[in-house]
Image (cartoon, rainbow, N blue to C red):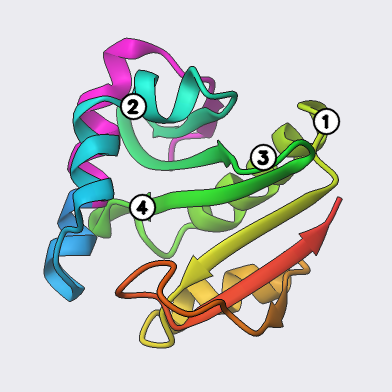
Amino acid sequence: MSQIQILPYAPEFNSHFKRINQAWVEELFSLEPFDILQFESPEETIIQPGGTIIFAKLGEEIVGTVALYKSGEDTFEMIKMGVDPKAQGHGIGMLLGKAIINKAAEMGGKKLVLYSNSKLKAALHIYEKLGFQSVIPESGKYCRCDVKMELAL
């Protein structure tokens, strides 16, 4: 198997950010207005406000992605983590998780939060292995999310 590379954000990867995440969101849930904005304008909605997006490359193909959204002075939200189904089972989600945690710390983050859904057992398992702890989610943050987790950096 080819080596997995973690790549920093580059505008030419925007189509992969949308393709990978839109697929799992539409399969399990439905797109919310914020999803569409992030997919169509990642630079304006994620990068410019102080966040970033990283990508996983396996061989010559982008197969995974995750983003950081700056939600407070020293707080980031981990958003839009996805791995192409044909590349799942190779530890790519764990590699992306570790890389984005390191990136959040490099960018001055003291806390990393994420919102998920209890249906996403594999993702929740990765988050727990990365050290995230479950907390009570605020009501109405995201329609599809019934799980909130935090990690002190």
User: How far across and how far down the image is residue 104, in percent?
Assistant: 72, 37
- The x, y position of residue 10, in whole percent, is 41, 13
Check whether the beta carbons of the residues at disc 2 and disc 4 lie within 8 A of each other.
no
Mark 1: secondary structure: loop
Out of 95 and 36, give the one closest to the viewer: 36
Residue identifier under label 4 = 83
Among numbered discs 2 and 4, the one appearing first in the sequence: 2
Of marks 1 and 2, which one's residue comes earlier in the chain? 2
Give the residue type that dot 4 points to: Val
Q: Which residue is mark 1?
A: 108
Instruction: Point out which mark residue 71 bears.
Output: none
Could you give the CA–CA distance between mark 2 and mark 3, rounded to whole angstroms? 19 Å
Q: Earlier in the sequence, mark 1 or mark 4?
A: 4
Residue at 42 percent of width and 41 percent of height: 65
Measured along the vertical axis of the image, is residue 70 above or below residue 24? Answer: above
Task: Choose mark 1 or mark 4, whichever is in front.
Answer: 1
User: What segment carries the magenta color?
Assistant: 1-21
Residue 29 spot, x, y in % from top left: 18, 73
Q: Is residue 103 left or right of residue 78?
A: right
Q: Is residue 110 magenta?
A: no
Q: Mark 1 and 2 residues: CB-CB less than 8 Å, in contact?
A: no
Quote the CA–CA distance across marks 2 and 4. 18 Å
Quarter of the picture containing the N terminus is top left
Tell me the CA gap for discs 3 and 4. Answer: 14 Å
Of the residues shown, which amino acid type is indicated by label 3?
A: Ala
Residue on which disc 2 sits = 42
On residue 99, the disc is 3
When asked about the image quadrant of residue 73, the answer is top right
Amino acid type, label 2: Pro
| Residue lying at 71% horizontally and 72% vertically, measured from the top left | 129
